[in-house]
Image: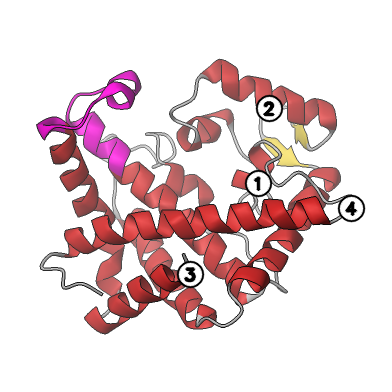
């Protein structure tokens, strides 16, 4: 691992590594799915993204807006209605969206694809140790979330926090370490996404503004502030543990 003078620099460096690991598993799962007759589409709307949330708890439309903050309400509602029509989701009188038995069957089939994918692409790596380190960072991020009060007095979800929606993540009892690592890293990506959103909102930008923003001083300041916020949960790790996590994930790419 390179030497990082600041924890924020480490957070900025490990973020694209986590992203690459995440993308690689999805690509491998699609390849496995193509080989298996009757396997589910590895990207069935919300079910794949929220595979570690829906088995544990229902979701509100406000929660979906937090997770998919760069989309529009019409886009989200279209997917919700599609899932309702397909019988993957059901809506209760309070507007809460629950996974149905059919939806849960799809989610657990996806876990099967992910398990096959990580077994294929990570057969000889120190995945259990990396999953343990990722759990430590994720747990610290959850602790920070629960002890940090928003000035408005509202919950993190109410003020647009995707991380509050996806934690604690569902972990199947029979999930191999590779799937646990994959899920924990996916949840941590939402932590950084919230840090990024807070940074551009702090700079007075809208969704449209940040999407259109080119490279330059403003984006650099936003990225620096994002890294400062995203760095906080990595404090739980020693320098040696941070190096092991960074180097270990890099070898998975």
Which mark, residue 48? 1
**How did the renderer colour the structure?**
secondary structure
Label 2, label 1: how many angstroms apart (C-alpha)? 14 Å
Question: Dot 2: what SS?
Answer: helix
Question: Residue 77, located in which quarter of the rendered image?
Answer: top right
Q: Which of 104 and 145 is in front in this view?
A: 104
Q: Mark 2 points at which residue?
A: 80
Question: Dot 3: what SS?
Answer: helix
Question: Dot 1: what SS?
Answer: helix
Q: Name the residue under label 4.
A: 37
Question: Dot 4: what SS?
Answer: loop
> Image check: 159 left or right of 172?
left
- Mark 1 vs 4, N-terminal side: 4
Label 3, label 1: how many angstroms apart (C-alpha)? 21 Å
Label 3, label 4: how many angstroms apart (C-alpha)? 28 Å
- Mark 3 vs 1, N-terminal side: 1
Answer few, some or many: residues within 10 Å of disc 2's Cα (few below 14, many 20 plus, some between 14 and 19).
many
Q: Mark 3 points at which residue?
A: 252
Question: Is 212 within the magenta?
Answer: yes
Whether residue 167 is visible here, answered yes or no, is no
- Mark 2 vs 1, N-terminal side: 1
Q: Position of residue 68 (x, y in %)?
A: 49, 33
Q: Position of residue 232 (x, y in %)?
A: 25, 61
> Are dots 2 and 1 in contact, CB under 8 Å?
no
Q: Nearer the viewer, residue 160 or 188?
A: 188
- Mark 4 vs 2, N-terminal side: 4
Q: Position of residue 140 (x, y in %)?
A: 36, 66
- Mark 2 vs 3, N-terminal side: 2
Name the front one of labels 3 and 1: 3
Name the front one of labels 1 and 4: 4
Give the magenta part as a residue range. Answer: 196-218
């Amino acid at each position: 691992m390179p030497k990082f003078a600041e924890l924020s620099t480490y957070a900025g460096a490990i973020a694209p590594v986590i992203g690459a690991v995440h993308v690689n598993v999805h690509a491998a799962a699609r390849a496995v799915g193509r080989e298996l007759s009757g396997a589910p589409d590895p990207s069935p709307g919300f079910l794949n993204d929220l595979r570690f949330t829906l088995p544990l708890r229902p979701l509100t439309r406000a929660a979906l807006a937090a997770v998919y903050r760069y989309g529009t309400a019409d886009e989200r509602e279209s997917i919700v209605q599609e899932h309702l029509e397909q019988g993957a989701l059901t809506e209760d009188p309070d507007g809460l969206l629950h996974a149905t038995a059919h939806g849960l069957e799809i989610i657990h089939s996806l876990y099967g694809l992910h398990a096959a994918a990580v077994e294929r692409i990570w057969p000889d790596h120190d995945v259990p140790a990396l999953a343990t380190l990722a759990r430590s960072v994720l747990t610290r991020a959850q602790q920070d979330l629960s002890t940090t009060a928003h000035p408005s007095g509202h919950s993190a979800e109410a003020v647009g926090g995707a991380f509050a929606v996806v934690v604690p993540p569902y972990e199947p009892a029979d999930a191999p370490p590779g799937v646990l690592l994959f899920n924990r890293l996916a949840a941590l990506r939402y932590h950084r996404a919230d840090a990024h959103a807070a940074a551009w909102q702090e700079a007075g930008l809208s969704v449209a503004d940040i999407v259109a923003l080119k490279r330059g001083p403003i984006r650099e300041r936003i990225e620096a502030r994002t890294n400062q916020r995203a760095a906080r949960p990595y404090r739980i790790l020693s320098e040696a543990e941070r190096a092991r996590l960074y180097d270990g994930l890099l070898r998975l790419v």
